[in-house]
């Protein structure tokens, strides 16, 4: 890899130099570090907030006292402790980059203390709620019920993150081997098993509803082409009369992605969140349910049914087992509730002898 070009601060325009440093940092994390698109967006959003606070201040001349004021600025911006901690992490990485480029003499951002974070247990659905959720998309109510059932089955069967599922391609699914290939964080590939329910739901989607979307698009494309030919013929016959074609969005006749919208386009992460929340609300689940809740439920139910923590770590694609250990806390909460409800010497009401 060629050495990075040194970025020397220029005295011509402080503002333009500081904007250039941010631009070069974003290029660095995208191309040299090859961080994911979503991670780059997060860094960009955090540092834009930092630049908003920065104003006319000079980055090389900032003091730790001034950066402490930035922490107060974040607190007054109604950010949660988790969001503040993430903003400070982005700032540390940015200053580390500037230190390597010789823009600053030391990384004073490393001295900032993140707010203390309470360990929050993830929202987890019970196995009964999951059973109801997976069959909630209904043909008499939901236009895309076949696709939605397949998506919910895949989320729960594999524990995929939302970004991983919307980027899943048809070539990544191996029905003959009952598995699929996931491209996780850091472009790490992993093979995930698929259960019978997920396979059947995906087969129904890929063999019936998905082809019909593109067949409908093809019929629409044909109608547009016929209309365009009629307009062209009329323009040739009557050149003095102006005719205007009706603008239209690009029509997709195919897609490499496993799950698509009703228009055949790649499914957006936001659409996936809305989809999961819609069906969760309909079964009476908590309103804060998201695709990540299905990932949490996947891990928790595996542990409840005897899976080893290391095995769950591997299936989730966690680098560190410390990240996976939070699911043991979720399971202990359930066991504590069972104990307090049923044990005669628990803190709950004693059972009659």
Image (tube, rainbow, N blue to C red):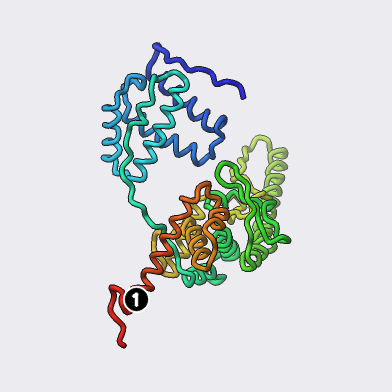
Q: Is residue 144 visible?
A: no
Quarter of the picture containing the N terminus is top right
Position of residue 165 measured from the top left corner of the image (x, y, whole percent): 57, 53
Neighbourhood count class around disc 1 (C-alpha, 10 Å): few under 14, some 14–19, many 20 upward: some
Position of residue 338 measured from the top left corner of the image (x, y, whole percent): 38, 73
Quarter of the picture containing the C terminus is bottom left
Q: Nearer the viewer, residue 314 or 62?
A: 314
Q: Is residue 349 visible?
A: yes
Which residue is at a point 41% across and 64% down the rendered structure image?
Answer: 332
Position of residue 202 measured from the top left corner of the image (x, y, whole percent): 64, 62
Which residue is at a point 50% across and 58% down the rendered structure image?
Answer: 295
**Is residue 282 rendered to the left or right of residue 227?**
left
Which residue is at a point 42% across and 36% down the rendered structure image?
Answer: 45
Which residue in the protein does label 1 denote? 341
Q: Seen from this angle, which residue lies furthest top?
A: 12
Position of residue 125 measured from the top left corner of the image (x, y, whole percent): 45, 65
């Amino acid at each position: 890899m060629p050495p990075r070009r040194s970025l020397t601060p220029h005295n011509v325009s402080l503002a333009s130099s500081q904007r250039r440093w941010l631009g070069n940092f974003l290029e660095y994390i995208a191309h040299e570090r090859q961080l994911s698109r979503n991670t780059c967006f997060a860094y960009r959003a955090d540092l834009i907030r930092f630049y908003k606070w920065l104003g006319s201040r000079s980055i090389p001349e900032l003091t730790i006292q001034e950066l402490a004021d930035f922490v107060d600025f974040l607190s007054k911006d109604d950010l949660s402790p988790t969001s503040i901690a993430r903003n400070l992490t982005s700032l540390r990485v940015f200053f580390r980059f500037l230190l390597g480029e010789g823009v600053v003499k030391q990384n004073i951002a490393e001295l900032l203390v993140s707010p203390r974070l309470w360990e929050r247990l993830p929202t987890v659905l019970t196995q009964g709620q999951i059973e109801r959720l997976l069959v909630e998309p209904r043909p008499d109510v939901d236009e895309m019920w076949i696709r939605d059932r397949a998506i919910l089955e895949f989320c729960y069967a594999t524990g995929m993150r939302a970004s991983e599922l919307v980027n899943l391609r048809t070539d990544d699914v191996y029905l003959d081997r009952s598995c699929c290939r996931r491209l996780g964080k850091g472009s790490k590939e992993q093979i995930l098993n698929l259960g019978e329910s997920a396979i059947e739901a995906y087969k129904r989607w890929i063999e019936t509803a998905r082809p019909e979307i593109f067949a409908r698009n093809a019929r629409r494309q044909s109608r547009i082409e016929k209309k365009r030919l009629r307009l062209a013929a009329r323009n040739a016959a009557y050149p003095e009369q102006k005719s205007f074609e009706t603008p239209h969005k690009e029509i997709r006749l195919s897609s490499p992605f496993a799950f698509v919208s009703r228009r055949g386009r790649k499914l957006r992460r936001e659409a996936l969140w809305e989809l999961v929340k819609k069906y969760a609300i309909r079964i009476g689940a908590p309103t804060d349910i998201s695709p990540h809740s299905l990932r949490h439920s996947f891990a928790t139910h595996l542990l409840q049914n005897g899976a080893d923590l290391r095995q769950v770590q591997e299936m989730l694609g966690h680098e560190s087992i410390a990240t996976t250990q939070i699911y043991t806390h979720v399971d202990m909460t359930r066991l504590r509730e069972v104990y307090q409800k049923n044990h005669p010497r628990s803190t709950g009401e004693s059972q009659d002898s």
